[in-house]
């Protein structure tokens, strides 16, 4: 039997925070039963979330020869952001790294995953003006997929694919702008519904199906999404996920598909429709090994673990509220030559293992810090610490941080299997970090200076520590 196109493995990543209340005037009554949005932390962006989603997958062997990053919020213009993801994952240099931009890029990435065997991360950070009508309807997330391999992809086989392109001015952003501009959704909904129905009808006909077990609809227009779900007979499970996360941009079709595959049974069929600047429809048949195709937590489990975030804190994180910080100079910008020389440490968290005593030295060097014996080769043995548990042995609280927080914890932690790390704590209040706490590395943006983003690894609790709703 020839190779079949499809998805061999998948994972989703939701940041640790959720925003449920965006009242500018706290004297008014909160809206009950309203939507909530997933919120990336101040040190997260589309690159760091893509890394976290891809890290859930198995070791990067058999990932194909291309890594794709689909996003509308790339941290750089002109520079390829997928290259940073590639470096953080330690992929083979022979794997190319390519950015896909725009609201339709998520569907394009899924197409290349299923039909060209690529590996893709769909990730986005969505920001509106404070108090915008759709502020809680936009969210942050990432999803990752590996193209099918062999005669039967584990997660899902692609049965049919159809597209419908139409030019419509719906959501757009000029270079240098932070927020999307949006046309009246009543007009654009009609255009997107027509495109969505055309694509879905053609995909189902090509698949020889009159109906499917699961309907998943992603659209940048909420009105269009609701209409298409009703027309296609959806059960509303995708709408429930979207109401909890918001529309997550380029990541949204991947996020909703991941949530569907979390519950789908082998042999069932799935219609995924993305109606954004046209429409893209996919018909999948769920694979027999669907339960082994996902190695990370389910979308619903991640939703249940999210921490409530206060609106004032959210605005500070997004740079939408200018707050006086400490009288402290900005952190220096990283320089290109040392970043290149120490890429193994900076991006992959690699330490050096001593040939004589086996101890791990961090940052890596040619002389062991334990026994003092130099390495016998020009290139000491390297070992990555990014997937290992670290136990906190010392905690310091920084009250003069230039980050958009009142204080952050700096920890020293011993790594399982050898090595010691000094790092900022992430996704946990500084006062909750304690000696003996187990933490795991997470790839984050430390700061941005002189238009250069400084990425490195922080440590976050291995189990959720509930945050305080700091306004």
Image (cartoon, rainbow, N blue to C red):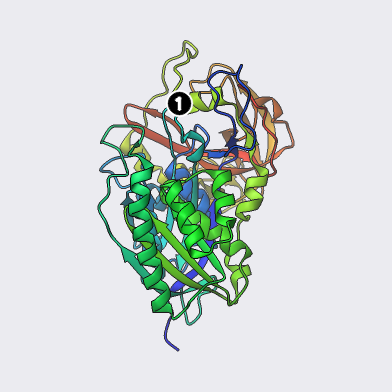
> Mark 1 = which residue?
130
Task: Give above or below for 426 relative to 275.
Answer: above
Residue 189 or 27: which is nearer the viewer? Answer: 189
Q: Residue at x 47, y 10 (%)?
A: 327
Q: Residue at x 60, y 21 (%)?
A: 471
**Where's residue 42, x and y in %?**
50, 31
**Where's residue 341, x and y in %?**
36, 43
Task: Give above or below for 130 relative to 274.
Answer: above
Residue 295 or 457: which is nearer the viewer? Answer: 295
Q: Residue at x 42, y 62 (%)?
A: 119
- Residue 125 falls in image quadrant: top left
Quadrant of the drawing holding the N terminus: bottom left
Numbered label tally? 1
Q: Given the current orientation, which residue lies at the most extreme top position?
A: 327
Q: Residue at x 35, y 52 (%)?
A: 190
Residue 27 or 60: which is nearer the viewer? Answer: 27
**Where's residue 84, x and y in %?**
39, 47
Kind of element beneath mark 1: loop
């Amino acid at each position: 039997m020839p190779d079949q196109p499809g998805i061999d493995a998948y994972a989703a990543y939701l940041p640790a925070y959720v925003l449920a209340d965006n009242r500018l005037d706290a004297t008014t009554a909160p809206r009950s039963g309203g939507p909530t949005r997933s919120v990336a932390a101040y040190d997260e962006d589309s690159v760091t979330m893509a890394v976290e989603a891809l890290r859930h997958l198995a070791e990067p062997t058999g990932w194909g020869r291309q890594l794709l990053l689909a996003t509308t919020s790339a941290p750089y213009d002109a520079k390829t952001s997928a290259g940073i993801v590639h470096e953080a994952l330690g992929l083979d240099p022979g794997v190319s790294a390519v950015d896909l931009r725009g609201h339709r890029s998520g569907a394009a990435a899924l197409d290349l995953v299923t039909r060209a065997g690529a590996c893709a991360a769909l990730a986005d950070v969505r920001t509106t003006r404070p108090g915008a009508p759709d502020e809680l309807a936009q969210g942050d997330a990432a999803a990752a997929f590996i193209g099918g391999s062999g005669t039967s992809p584990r997660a899902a086989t692609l049965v049919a694919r159809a597209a419908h392109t139409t030019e419509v001015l719906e959501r757009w952003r000029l270079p240098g702008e932070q927020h999307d501009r949006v046309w009246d959704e009543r007009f654009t909904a009609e255009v997107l519904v027509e495109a969505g129905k055309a694509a879905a009808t053609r995909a189902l006909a090509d698949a020889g199906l009159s109906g499917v077990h699961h309907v998943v609809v992603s659209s940048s227009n909420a009105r269009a999404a609701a209409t298409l779900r009703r027309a296609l007979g959806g059960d509303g499970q995708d709408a429930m996920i979207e109401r909890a996360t918001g529309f997550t941009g380029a990541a949204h079709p991947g996020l909703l598909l991941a949530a569907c595959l979390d519950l789908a049974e082998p042999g069932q069929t799935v219609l995924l429709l993305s109606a954004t600047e046209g429409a893209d429809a996919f018909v999948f048949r769920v694979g027999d090994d669907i339960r082994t195709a996902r190695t990370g937590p389910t979308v619903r489990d991640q939703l249940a673990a999210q921490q409530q975030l206060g609106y004032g804190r959210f605005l500070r994180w997004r740079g939408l509220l200018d707050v006086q910080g400490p009288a402290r100079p900005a952190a220096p910008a990283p320089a290109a030559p040392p970043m290149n020389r120490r890429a193994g440490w900076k991006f992959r968290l690699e330490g050096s293992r001593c040939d004589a005593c086996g101890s791990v030295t961090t940052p890596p060097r040619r002389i062991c810090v334990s026994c003092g014996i130099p390495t016998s080769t020009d290139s000491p043995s390297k070992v990555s610490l990014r997937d290992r548990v670290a136990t906190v042995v010392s905690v310091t609280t920084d009250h003069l941080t230039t980050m958009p927080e009142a204080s952050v914890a700096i920890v020293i932690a011993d790594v399982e299997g050898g090595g010691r790390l000094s790092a900022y704590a992430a996704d946990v209040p500084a006062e909750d970090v304690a000696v003996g706490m187990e933490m795991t590395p997470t790839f984050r943006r430390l700061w941005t200076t002189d238009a250069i983003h400084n990425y490195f690894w922080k440590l976050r609790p291995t189990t959720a520590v509930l945050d305080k709703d700091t306004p």
